[in-house]
Each structure stands twice: as C-alpha cells, then as structure tokens.
Amino acid sequence: MREKLIYLFSAIAAVLLAWDLYRVFMVLPDEANQGAIYRIIYFHVPAAMTSLLGFFVAMVCSALYLITRNLRFDSVAAAVTEVGVVFAAVNLVTGSIWGRIIWGIWWTWDARLTSMLVCWLLYAGYLMLRRAIDEPTQRARLSAVLSIFAFVDVIIVWKSIEWWRTQHPGPVLSIRNGGGMAPGMESPLWWNVLAMALVATSLVLLRMRQEGIRREIDALRRYAHAL
Amino acid sequence: MLYLRQILAIAGKDLRSELRSKETVNASLSFALVILLLFSFAFDPSAETVREISGGLLWLVFAFAGALVLNRSFAREQPNDCLDALIASPTSGAQLFLGKCLANFVLLMAVEMICVPVFGIFYNVAWTRRIGWLTVVFALGTWALTIIGTMFSALTVNLRLRELMLPILVYPMMIPALMGAIQLTTVLMTGAPPGPENQVWLRLLVGFDIIFTILGVGLVEIVLVG
Amino acid sequence: MDTRNFTFMFYGFLAAWIIVLGYVVSIAMRESRLRKELDRVRQMIEGREK
C-alpha cells in the first residue's frame, strides 16, 4: 500500500514539476528589475514552505509521541525532520545564490536569514542527537522534547520579515497581504509548493519504511540474543 | 509556599556547594577574563569600533563562560547517584529545574558583574550611564541563557557525548535571545536609551524568556524522569 | 551582466537538484545496507534455531 502511495505521489509530483518548469522557463517573461534570476523563487520559496511545514508536522508528531508513547510517531518525526533539513538546505543555498546576484552578497545577518540558518542548525542538531542515543525509548523521548523546543525558531523564521526590517524582501505573497506578484507569476509558485510537498511526502514515506526495517532488525537481534 | 521554599532549598544547595569549592565559578571567570584580554590586544579596537562591538563581545564572552557553569549544573549530580536521589525526592522535576536555574542565574550574574567593569577598564568604555536599563537587559539575557543551558544540561546529562552535544544544541537555540541582548547592550553602551527601533529586540527577549521558561518547566519532568 | 544572471540562475537550479538527488541517493544506499543487514540477521537466526 505504502509502495503504491510513494509511486503515486512521485508521479504526480513529476508531472506537476515538469509542467511548472515549462511555464517558468518558457512562458513567463523576465522580471523588470531582476532579469532571469528571479525564476529561482520557484524553488526557493516552495523549499522553504515544505521544510517549515515538515518541522511543524515533526513538532506535532513529537507532542503526540510524548502523549501516547507510540514509537510510530517518533519514526514520523525523525523522517519528516530529515527531509525538512534537506529542503531547508535547498532554501538556504538557492537564496544565497540569488542574493549574490541581486544584493551582491552571498550572506547577511538579517533576521530572516539568521533565523533560517539557526533553524537548519537546530534540526541538524536534532539528527545528531538521535545518532548519539542508542536506546530507542530514550532517543524518542529526548528528541521529541528537542523538536518542540526547536519549533519556536520556526515561528520566528515565519514572522521575521513582518517583525523586523530585513535585507530579505518583505511580505510579497497574497496570503501574507503583501505587495503581490505580477499576474500569472504567483500561480506556478503555489503549484510548485504542492509538487515539492508531494516529493517530500514520498521521501518521508521511503524513510519511514526504512525505519520499519530498522525496527525489525532490532527486534530480530533481540530474539537472536534470547536464543 | 512550600513549592517556593523547595525551589529555594535546591537553589541554596547548589549555591552553597559551589561557593564552598568555587571551582566552576573560578573556571568560568578566568575564561571570561582571558577572552576579554585576548580580544583587546588581538584587535586593539579604536573607540568607535569598541562601541559597535561592545554588545557582541560581552555576550559572546558570557555565552562561552556561561556554558561552563551550565554544563556542570546537572553533570555535578552524576557521581554517587545524586541525580536519582533528587528525582526520587518529593520535589517535582519542575522545582528541581527552577531551583537549578535560580542558582545558575545568580552565578552567571556574578561572573557578568565582575566582567563588565574589567571590560570598561580595558576597552575604555563608560558603561555606567544607562546602568538601570543595562541591568534589566543583562538580567533578561542571562535568564534566557540560564533557562536554555539548564534545560539542555538536563537533556544531555545521561548521554555519553554530553560535552559535545551541549554546545551544539544550546548555541543555535540561544541565537535569537543573544541577538536581542547584543543589540540592546550595544545601544546602551553608547549611552542612549533603547529607542523605538530597539523595542522589537526588547520584546523578543521578554517573549523568549517567557516562552522558554514555560516550555522548560513543562517538559523537564519528561526529560529527567521519562 | 545578463550572461552572469543566466549562469547563476542555472547554478541555483543545479544546486537545488544536486542537494535533493544527493539525498535520494543516500536514502537508496541506506536501503540496500539495511536490506543486507536484515538478510544477515535472518540467516543468523535460522542458523541458531537449527
């Protein structure tokens, strides 16, 4: 069943991405002030949204684990965080490349960039913490607490462009009551968000299947020791 | 009332044990002063540069020196199963946590109170002009450091890679509060009061303190006991 | 300026794809490693049960 979901999501994502990229490269004109480079927004913003959404799901699953002590929630949290870290890296790297052209700098310590980097560091630390603990229940418990703590920064990342004046552009998208993009430019963005979310979901399902295999190996080892 | 007395009892125990040996405070203070001195002659900053970096320098020093104190906080209970005894006692995890936070806060503030005049001397900065506001900012920033550091000290106490994991987890978590404290301290060191454009940093510090205190008190029982 | 603009856009998309595909490759490698270990543990159990 899970296999079929993985293939289904990947297929839909592939179709959406292909259609979107066609639109992004062939149909849309260059932006007035930025030239061609602005098209990177169609990877930069969806990657950010996917990773932040992933961290939110991780926080919820961590809380659910602490309430129910069902290790499945812990597996979901770990898998989603790992995928979230990957997409956060995509966000940081594409943003840096974009910034090099537009602002002339690879990096700056404004509120948005700093909080996003901190976010990446925190969740990379989460993955490191998991590696450092062997006992499954202790690992699940401690990383769940860390995930809840780390989520506070995700909120800061989301709100940073409203609360501070940043080098990073202020709210632009329609959902944030921003200045709005040119007509026709915003819709491929949202379709790409969906496509990336589907890719992320497939990856999470793949990772969860691996966690299941890992748990089976652990159980078989315990059985082998008992023999 | 009993709740509060138990918290103060734990804080008192930690402070008394620390004041008897003074090893952590000495290590922390020496470390802080050495960094301050090294920066001073490594960069030999001019007067304007010093004013610009004063907040950053001070708070980095406090963060690094503070980590020494905070790491010891739960680690000192490891020998002789003291931690198990404390957890098994009638005090709740939250009381243990708050007691240790109080003790750590006092220790960190003491280190900072010594560092600031030294900073003033070696870098020729007049820091007494806004001393009221400065105390408030120091208290808020130190409380943020304390809460996060004590919490993660509890979280990492049973891990074999404790010394490695604590800095990796604590410093990124601290960055929003550190940024706020740094901005406000730099402004106050120039003698100006925190104006409207710095209100957002003040609000960030206060919000950070409140949120993480609540989260810490709520979750520490799970971390310590299970 | 214009060519640089285009090259960097290309770099940006390339970087994004490399990161994601790199992750997919690491997942695949971990999968094969886990499967091998599972087979090994299963064989070990069959050996012990006999």
Image (cartoon, rainbow, N blue to C red):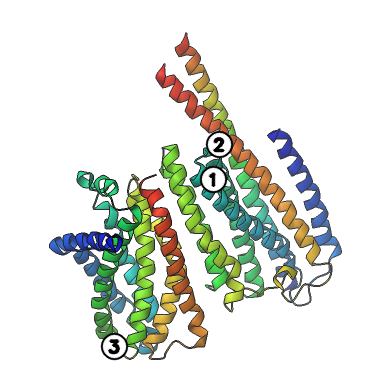
Secondary structure beneath label 3? loop
The residue shown at (75%, 70%) is A174
Res. A132 image quadrant: top left
Query: From this viewpoint, which residue is outermost toward the front?
Result: B1
The residue shown at (80%, 63%) is A187
Give percent across and percent down for residue B140. 38, 74
Q: Earlier in the sequence, mark 2 or mark 1?
A: 1
Amino acid at circle 2: Glu
Give percent across and percent down for residue B49. 39, 85
Amino acid at circle 1: Ala
**A23 up-or-down from A224: above or below:** below
Chain containing mark 3: B
Chain containing mark 1: A
Give percent across and percent down for residue A49. 66, 59
Query: From this viewpoint, which residue is outermost toward the top?
Result: C50
Separation of marks 2 and 1 at Cα, in angstroms: 9 Å
- Mark number, residue B124: 3
The residue shown at (41%, 19%) is A226
- Mark number, residue A211: 2
**A156 up-or-down from B123: above or below:** above
Res. B212 image quadrant: bottom left
Query: Mark 2 touching mark 1, by CB under 8 A?
Result: yes
Label 2 Cα crowd, 10 Å radius (few <14 / some 14-19 / many 20+): many
Q: Could you tell whether A81 is left or right of A176 in the image?
A: left
Secondary structure beneath label 2? helix
Q: Could you tell whether B186 is left or right of B90 in the image?
A: right
- Mark number, residue A78: 1
